[in-house]
Image: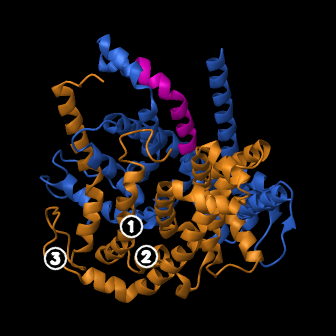
Amino acid sequence: MTRDRGRRQLAMMLAPYLLGLTVLVLAPFAVTVVLAFTEYDLIRPPRWIGTDNFTALAEDPIFRTALVNSLLFAAVAVPLRLTIALSLALLLHRRSRFAGTARTAAVLPSAVPEIAYGLLWLWLLNPLYGPISQVLRAGGQNGLTVFGRTPPQWLTDPVDARAAIILMSLFTIGETFVILLAVRRSLPPDVYELAALEDATGWDVLRRITWPLMRPVLVLLLIRDAILSLQFSFLPALVVTDGGPPPYATTYIPLFSYRTAFEYLRYGYAAAATAVMLALTVAAVALQWRLLRRHEALRDR
Amino acid sequence: MPYPSRAARLWRTLGAVFVVLVFVPPLLLLVSGSFTEPGRPPPPTPRLVPDPLSTVGYEQALALGGLVRATVMSLVVAAVTVPLSVLVAAWAGFALAQVSRRVTAMVVGASLLALMAPATALLLPRFVLFRNLGLTDTLVPLIAPALIGVSPLYVLIYYLAFRGLPADLYDTCRLADLTPLRTWWRFALPVVRPVTAGLTALSFILTWSNFLDPLVYVYDRDLFTLPLALRSLSILDPTDFPVFLAGAVLATVPPVVVFLLAQRWFLQSDDPTGRLR
């Protein structure tokens, strides 16, 4: 009897979490998929329109721009973020002077609330008041840099604006850094001792030991960060560049979907855009799964 | 371990200093900008310490933005969400370490999936759900993430921590006829106290900074949390930067202090088999 009671209690302890997963994650997946095939404005009940939303998306130039922007952002920002996080982890994993302070400093920007961080950059990038432009203009004349060129127009030039959003994302690598730090510390020290005995150069150690040992984790983090780029590109685009400069230079899929739903009240259409976002996510997870399986197969051989 | 050469150590130190010099200035600039006097033309040369130093930005931010009320709302949300999320995560993690392997595998799989889904992709469907339940424009959707432990990652961390406890502990408790709830409270939870401390801190930081959820669920100004109030402050006058930077500093202080207090649990233990195991 007590066994049964024990089991009932365990089920009770797990229940709130299962409820949360169902309501906040699984149900939203289902809702997105269903809504994507409807026309819905929150007032009238959803009207089934089949695949019309998706055909419209395929022909929508704004959505296409947003898709290309999102992929471009991920293609540039994610490898950079990962490289920075990895370099920091390799540099700071050992006890040395200032290493502790540097570790804290590297994670600090990630602890700043997203909106405060966005507003900070709204000021930093301002062409007139922003310290970045001021520093770049220092020593130059008539608002030009020392080399006689105009400083980047972060908020009005499409290429510069995209670069600015990428630049913003490079400081918030705390989570990835903490994971890589833990992974680097868990690598077996005797391999490194052996390498030191054989007078291996730092480059050899990196290429022959550290890199192969850390590669599986790096692949996972690469894919995870690529998916998360659909999340951390939203706020900068909303607050700092407002999706512009015109026409839609920094409109990414999340912002497109947000505006379509909450500003233009086309919930079905926005759900279709969200479904594309989820499909990209699922594809990335599947890829990750395959890579992991292949890695395990190689290791077991 | 062979001692690294002096030159190598010097390079490491220089590298560490460089990291500090790159990652700290943005935050210093945030503080510096917030103490600039509003409405002045930009100084001809960039300066780290504004001249004159002025707290007008703070006064205006507090007067215009309704930041005091928003801070209270943020505190209310955090006061409910943080303990609830830690309880949910600790219970779920403990149960996962005890139930059959099939159930554990399924729940862990679902958690990993939930971890992968970008928050922006869940925003719209969650909104439709909450709207149909009549819960938009209340604080409920802001507290709801507590049911997944704010992040499913925290459930998984608790699961690993509880699974790492010696099996004897669980066996002894079972023989002594202790219920799982008592085992959890009297024996398991006290052992993983560092995990609880670290996760409480992270849960607070995440909850306090939550911007996406209030953005879509809350329109009533009286219910605005601090991040949302900051956003409307910046829309009010996007060129009056000392004012919204002052607001940003006020919003940044609590999570940064909590982070600085908590960071030793996941950053500074030089022994990798340390406390989180």
Q: Is residue A20 magenta?
A: no
State which quarter of the image contains the N terminus of chain B. top left
Disc 1 marks a residue whose amino acid type is Leu
Q: Colour of chain B?
A: orange
Region rendered in magenta? A207-225
Read off the chain for label 2. Answer: B
Instruction: State the image quarter where residue B46 is shown.
Output: bottom left
Is residue B174 visible to us here?
yes
Q: Secondary structure at mark 1?
A: helix
Give the percent coordinates (x, y) of residue B235: 44, 76
Instruction: State the image quarter where residue B177 is shown.
Output: bottom right
Disc 1 target residue? A119
**Circle 3 residues within 10 Å: few <14, some 14–19, many ≥20:** few
Residue in the image at 37% along x and 52% along y: B264
Disc 3 marks a residue whose amino acid type is Leu
Q: Could you give the CA–CA distance between mark 2 and mark 3, rounded to whole angstroms?
A: 22 Å
Q: Is residue B52 above or below residue A31?
A: below
Residue in the image at 75% along x and 70% along y: B129
Disc 3 target residue? B53
Q: Colour of chain A?
A: blue
Give the percent coordinates (x, y) of residue A53: 77, 57
Disc 2 target residue? B230
Give the percent coordinates (x, y) of residue A63: 64, 54
Q: Could you give the CA–CA distance between mark 1 and mark 3, rounded to whole angstroms?
A: 20 Å
**Circle 1 residues within 10 Å: few <14, some 14–19, many ≥20:** many
Residue in the image at 33% along x and 55% along y: A153
